[in-house]
């Protein structure tokens, strides 16, 4: 039977309205994205990731005193219990950082001082959200150190989230302003995106009256896949495989002829382009120019032209993010974990919104299996 037999069924839930939110709005026709009414470009250009996180969690931009206090709390909550590092160290060497991160958040839950609070305690959920957001950059960077056989180092409470991530990644060295600024803006662009797969998974989890950490663990597991957040890593591996601008056109035409999915292109919501990608492409090109390496930008231009000509598809945010991060010297398998650092804000904002006005999320499915089968005793099977 085909899907067209069922008028109320939309494969992949495409176009289905799954809920009401006040957190963000995607306008597919205008390729725009706003967080609580504010254009994401304004936040990325004029604000900081901390202001974005505050906006998502507390529903308004902070004033100076509120921001100062928020930064202080985030700085204090940045430390990770030693026991979590012990858990992370037990994982096999080949563990992907996303799996390490998922495990770390799972193990962190009972360490939260509000662990015993009921799932619908709004204030406790906000406190948990802040702790979850605060620890992400430390977990990703120190997780990277652990798998390199190095000891975790103490996070720096005086730096921004972007700054702390780079500081730990570079073994306790503060990054330059430009690198920190680019990282910060990319976190803002990645922070929130409506009912995307990982956020929806997070909402489904907490809607059973489970807790915020379980929601985040669901989110990380869902984000990992290459059709979602994992695309930024896959896009960079693809750019590396292409290797030079001279190879780009033949490579992409061959890939399309072989019906390959090109990672970092296409989007369920944006059919006329992803504005985050437009913004980050400019940033990635600027990094390339500053570093004297325009190779990736040139390959990207060819891929974008051919994808539009042949498939009518535009790049999504993961495409420029891939070579922007590469040019900043970030290990490729940390790209999706960086997405987690950003998205802990959107996930927890959605989890709080869900729990503030909760109803179990439980859609229907259509049964197409066999009917009226006899039970055959085991010795006759
Ligand atoms: C994002 C994505 C999962 C959206 O999926 P979707 O809304 O279910 O769209 P579909 O996968 O059904 O794609 C619709 C058509 O466009 C094609 N298409 C979509 N994205 C494509 C891509 N990146 N490369 C090649 N073809 C693509 C599909 O093959 C399909 O063609 P068909 O109708 O001839 O079979 C999809 O575009 C994709 O897989 N992109 C690559 C992964 C990626 O970058 N993910 C990050 C998203 S932010």
Image (cartoon, rainbow, N blue to C red):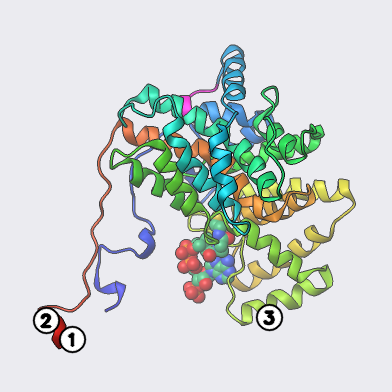
Q: Where's residue 200, x and y in %?
A: 40, 48
Secondary structure category for the residue under label 1: loop
Residue 146, percent across and down? 66, 45
The residue carrying mark 2 is: 377
Residue numbers of the magenta segment: 57-61
Q: Is 125 covered by the magenta stretch?
A: no
The residue shown at (59%, 12%) is 65
Residue 47: where, in percent of width, then height? 65, 28
Q: Is the Cβ of the residue at disc 2 closer than 8 Å to that at disc 3?
A: no
User: In front: 2, or 82?
Assistant: 82
- Local crowd at mark 1 within 10 Å, few (<14), some, or many (≥20)? few
Relative to the observer, which residue lies in front, 31 or 281? 281
Q: Residue at x 18, y 86 (%)?
A: 381
Q: Are marks 1 and 2 in contact (CB under 8 Å)?
A: yes
Indicate the quadrant where residue 215 lies: top left
- At 25% across and 44% down in the image, what residue appears? 360
In the picture of the structure, the residue carrying the numbered disc 1 is 381
Location of residue 240 (image quadrant): bottom right
Residue linked to disc 3:
254
Kindly indicate the quadrant of the structure image that contains residue 128: top left
In this view, the residue farthest toward the top is: 65
Beta carbon at label 3 within 8 Å of ligand 1: no
How packed is label 3: few (under 14 Cα within 10 Å), some, or many (20 or more)?
few
């Amino acid at each position: 039977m085909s899907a067209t037999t069922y008028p109320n069924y939309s494969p992949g839930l495409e176009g289905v309205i799954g809920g009401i939110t006040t957190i963000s709005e995607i306008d597919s026709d205008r390729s725009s994205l706003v967080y609580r009414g504010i254009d994401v470009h304004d936040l990325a250009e004029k604000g900081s990731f901390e202001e974005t996180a505050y906006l998502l969690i507390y529903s308004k931009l902070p004033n100076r005193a509120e921001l100062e206090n928020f930064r202080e709390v985030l700085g204090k909550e940045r430390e990770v219990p030693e026991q979590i590092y012990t858990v992370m160290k037990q994982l096999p060497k080949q563990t992907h950082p996303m799996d390490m991160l998922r495990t770390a958040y799972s193990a962190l839950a009972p360490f939260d001082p509000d662990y015993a609070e009921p799932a619908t305690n709004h204030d406790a959920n906000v406190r948990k959200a802040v702790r979850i957001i605060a620890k992400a950059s430390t977990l990703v960077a120190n997780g990277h150190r652990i798998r390199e056989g190095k000891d975790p180092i103490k996070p720096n409470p005086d730096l921004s989230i972007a700054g702390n991530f780079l500081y730990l990644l570079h073994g306790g060295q503060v990054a330059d302003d430009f690198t920190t600024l680019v990282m910060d803006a990319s976190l803002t662009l990645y922070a929130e995106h409506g009912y995307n797969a990982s956020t929806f998974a997070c909402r489904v989890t907490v809607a059973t009256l489970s807790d915020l950490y379980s929601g985040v663990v669901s989110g990380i597991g869902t984000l990992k896949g290459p059709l979602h957040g994992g695309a930024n890593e896959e896009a960079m591996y693809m750019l590396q495989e292409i290797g030079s601008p001279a190879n780009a056109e033949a490579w992409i035409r061959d890939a399309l002829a072989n019906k390959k999915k090109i990672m970092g292109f296409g989007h369920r919501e944006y059919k006329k382009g992803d504005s985050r990608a437009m913004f980050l492409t400019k940033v990635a090109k600027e990094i390339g120019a500053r570093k004297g390496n325009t190779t990736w930008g040139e390959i990207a231009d060819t891929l974008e032209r051919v994808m539009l000509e042949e498939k009518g598809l535009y790049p999504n945010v993961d495409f420029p993010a891939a070579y922007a991060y590469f040019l900043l010297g970030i290990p490729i398998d940390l790209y999706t974990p960086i997405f987690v650092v950003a998205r802990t804000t959107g996930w927890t904002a959605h989890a709080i919104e869900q729990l503030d006005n909760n109803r179990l999320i439980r859609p229907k499915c259509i049964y197409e299996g066999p009917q009226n089968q006899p039970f055959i005793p085991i010795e006759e099977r």
